[in-house]
Image (cartoon, rainbow, N blue to C red):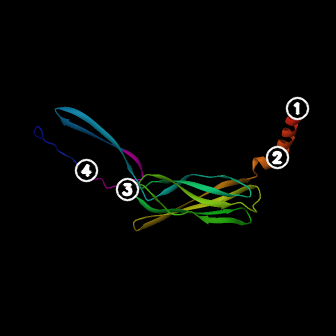
Amino acid sequence: VKPQENFVFRKKIDTVNYKPGNYKVAAIVEYGSPLFLEADFRIGSLFVTAANYTARFMKESISKFDIETESHWNNLIDEVYAEVRIFNATNNISTFKTPSESLERWGRKTLTGFFDTHGIGEGSYTADITLAYRSGKKTAQTSIQGTIEVVEEWWVRYKSLLVVAAVSVLLFV
């Protein structure tokens, strides 16, 4: 390389035999004195995970059911949506679907559906969350299962104690 000239060295790597994940590349450039260069890169796959979801709901309400999704793909994912089924050992309690969203490469986005707990008793239930997604012509889905809880609102549970406390304060004053 002559003075004031640039040289770009490119090497393509066939990643077919590599698993998705974080990798490091290193190079030693010798031109006079050695120069050590390194960089991080990722190999992705068309895969979306549910990093977190709402797990506690108030009884007799319609509550947001948020699902935090995370992309493991180096391209835009055009459509991501969740189908949620809530059930216990004997009954299917509720099913709903979230609206579709786009998910940026390696990005995170919260999908929101609504869970109607009217007529559902307090307790623990199983949530089956299936994420369906598409990038170009490729489609895929991921399923997870977890536990959610339906609880009585705290003020209903302790309403009689609050009334007694308020009357006591009024009598004391």
> What number of labels is visible?
4
Find the magenta span and give its range.
10-23
Type of residue at label 3? Asn
- In the figure, 136 relative to 4: above or below? below
Instruction: Report the residue marked by disc 4.
Output: 11
Q: Nearer the viewer, mark 2 or mark 3?
A: 2
Question: What numbered label is drawn on residue 159?
Answer: 2
Q: Are marks 2 and 4 in contact (CB under 8 Å)?
A: no
Q: Position of residue 135 (x, y in %)?
A: 42, 63
Instruction: Report the residue marked by disc 3.
Output: 17
Type of residue at label 4? Lys
User: Mark 3 to mark 1: distance in Å?
Assistant: 77 Å
Residue farthest left in this picture: 2
152 on left or right of 36: right
Q: Earlier in the sequence, mark 4 or mark 3?
A: 4
User: Mark 2 to mark 4: distance in Å?
Assistant: 70 Å
Looking at the rendered structure, the secondary structure element under dot 2 is helix
Instruction: Report the residue marked by disc 1.
Output: 172
Q: Position of residue 99 (x, y in %)?
A: 54, 63
Q: Are marks 3 and 1 in contact (CB under 8 Å)?
A: no
Q: Nearer the viewer, mark 3 or mark 1?
A: 1
Q: Is residue 99 magenta?
A: no
Helix, strand or loop for the magenta stretch, by majority: loop
Q: Residue at x 84, y 39 (%)?
A: 166
Comparing 32 with 136, the one in front is: 136
Q: Nearer the viewer, mark 2 or mark 1?
A: 1
Q: Are marks 1 and 4 in contact (CB under 8 Å)?
A: no
Q: Earlier in the sequence, mark 2 or mark 1?
A: 2
Residue 45: which quarter of the image?
Answer: bottom left
Comparing 168 with 6, the one in front is: 168
